[in-house]
Image (spheres, rainbow, N blue to C red):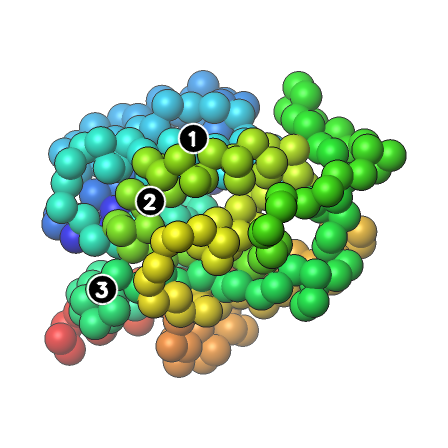
Amino acid sequence: MIAYLILTHRYPVQFKRLFNAVYHPNNFYLIHVDKKSSAELHEDIKQFLSTYPNAQILESESTVWGGYSLVNAELRGISQLLTLGLDWKFFINLSGQDFPLKSQKHIHNYLEEHIDSDFLKIMNQSECRADTMHRIENYVTEVDNEIISEPVLKRKFLDGVTPYIGNQWMILSRKFCEFITHSPEVERFKQFYEHTLIADEGFFQTVIMNTSYTSTIINDDKRAIDWIPMGTIKLRPRDFTTEDKLYLTKSNDLFARKFDETIDLKILDILDKHINQMVTIS
């Protein structure tokens, strides 16, 4: 069994396509709809999920790109999924603009071969991404859904800890989810990263590499993402289109990010067909 946490804030039709594409009765699904989203979106998704006994909605809170609120949503989701007591083995986080590249049977079989492994991109931040060190050196706060950085307030990093960085998107073992939820070792990481920029790309990586937790870490988040330049943000994921058909259908990744129904909806039709053919063959 897989436990999915899906974070969404717009495009209800696209969300439903994603949900149907990753749905399996033996999995469990927890959905977080950003509190800033319209009441209509909240109600639409609530009604849609009401027919699925293995799906619930995570209490809505506002999240801000670059803020710790995204990490908090992940931690709350993991905690709730553990509280349900279900016998799931892996946690997978998705956004409402992601899409699978493989069938659920394929994904399940693949993960069964890697029990207790954790899939996430990891690199030493100071050595490999020195340009991002300001994220943890500057004191950052979230106020009224905005990120306020105070570069004058330089901070010393956690004693005895090496900062790591990667992507927000992960496949985590239940073992690590239990550790990050219950271990007192994690508290100082929460307190520090609450005031860092883009904490969701470093918090989990830094915890897994600097605590007593041990497992097989696979330095791969199993996501197909095409990062392209975007102003001061440096990089952003390009929206996939039908021109990426071969790249996506031939990929060894399990999921892809990202897609936008207002730019190209047909690519989702192609991937749906691709996944259905995998089901038929298996």
Q: Which mark is residue 46?
A: none
Q: Which residue is mark 3?
A: 115
In the rendered view, tell whether residue 138 sits above or below residue 261. Answer: above
Dot 1 alpha-carbon crowd within 10 angstroms: few under 14, some 14 to 19, many 20 or more = many
Q: Residue furthest right?
A: 152
Q: Secondary structure at mark 3?
A: loop
Residue 99 horizontal side relative to residue 134, left or right: left
| Residue at image coords 75%, 61% | 130
Percent of width and height locating residue 159: 62, 46
2 vs 3, front mark: 2
Asked whether the viewer can see residue 266, the reply is no
Q: Earlier in the sequence, mark 2 or mark 3?
A: 3
Q: Secondary structure at mark 2?
A: helix
- Quick check: marks 2 and 3 in contact, CB under 8 Å? no
Asked whether the viewer can see residue 205, the reply is yes
In the rendered view, tell whether residue 143 sits above or below residue 128. Answer: above
Q: Amino acid at mark 2?
A: Phe
2 vs 1, front mark: 2
Task: Identify which residue, 6 or 263, lies in the foreground.
Answer: 6
Residue 244 horizontal side relative to residue 21, left or right: right
Task: Identify which residue, 135 or 97, lies in the foreground.
Answer: 135
Q: Which residue is mark 1?
A: 33
Q: Earlier in the sequence, mark 2 or mark 1?
A: 1
Q: Which residue is mark 2?
A: 179
Q: Quadrant of the C terminus?
A: bottom left
- Quick check: marks 2 and 1 in contact, CB under 8 Å? no
Q: Amino acid at mark 1?
A: Val
Q: Earlier in the sequence, mark 1 or mark 3?
A: 1
